[in-house]
Amino acid sequence: MPYIGETWRVERGADVVGEITVTEADFPWLNGRFTPGPAFAELRPHFVRELALIDTVDDDLAAWEDAYARASDGVRLIAPDGPVAEFLLHIDDDAAWFRWSDEPFLVE
């Protein structure tokens, strides 16, 4: 199955936020084991807050958007063959799940 076993990197500037080893592909999401890098400590509280707000996103979209913007500020997702144009990433301890696109997401 495509993607299973691949390692994707999460970077912020020149710093490594972590690596995701894909364990499951459930289109459009890829799920995997997250191994934090040195730059994750600074972002961890923002990912924790983002997940805490995701279940109530319909009640307060602005709060979730703010938390996600802080978690993803300057963050890049690097596929095995290079950076992706756009992504949505969630990290919960040693688990991560994400969707990605070679083209920027359309925002209406």
Image (cartoon, rainbow, N blue to C red):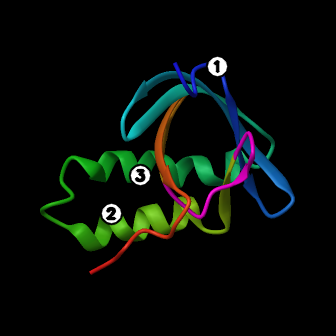
Identify the mark at residue 49; answer none if there is no mark: 3
Mark earlier in primary sequence (1, 3): 1
> At label 2, which amino acid type do we have?
Trp
The residue carrying pointer 3 sits among few (fewer than 14), some (14 to 19) or many (20 or more) residues within 10 Å by Cα, namely: some
> At label 3, which amino acid type do we have?
Arg
Residue 13: percent from the left, percent from the top? 80, 64
Q: Quadrant of the C terminus?
A: bottom left
The residue carrying pointer 1 sits among few (fewer than 14), some (14 to 19) or many (20 or more) residues within 10 Å by Cα, namely: few
Extreme-front residue of the structure: 1
Q: Which corner quadrant of the image does residue 21 belong to?
A: top right
Q: Is residue 2 left or right of residue 105?
A: right
Q: Is residue 94 visible?
A: no
Spatial CA span between label 2 and label 3? 8 Å
Residues in magenta, as a range: 79-87
Q: Which residue is mark 1?
A: 5
Q: Residue at x 72, y 39 (%)?
A: 18
In terms of depth relative to the viewer, which is nearer, 106 or 76?
Answer: 106
Q: Is residue 61 left or right of residue 36?
A: left
Q: Which residue is mark 2?
A: 64
Q: Is residue 24 above or below residue 104?
A: above
- Say whether residue 91 is magenta: no
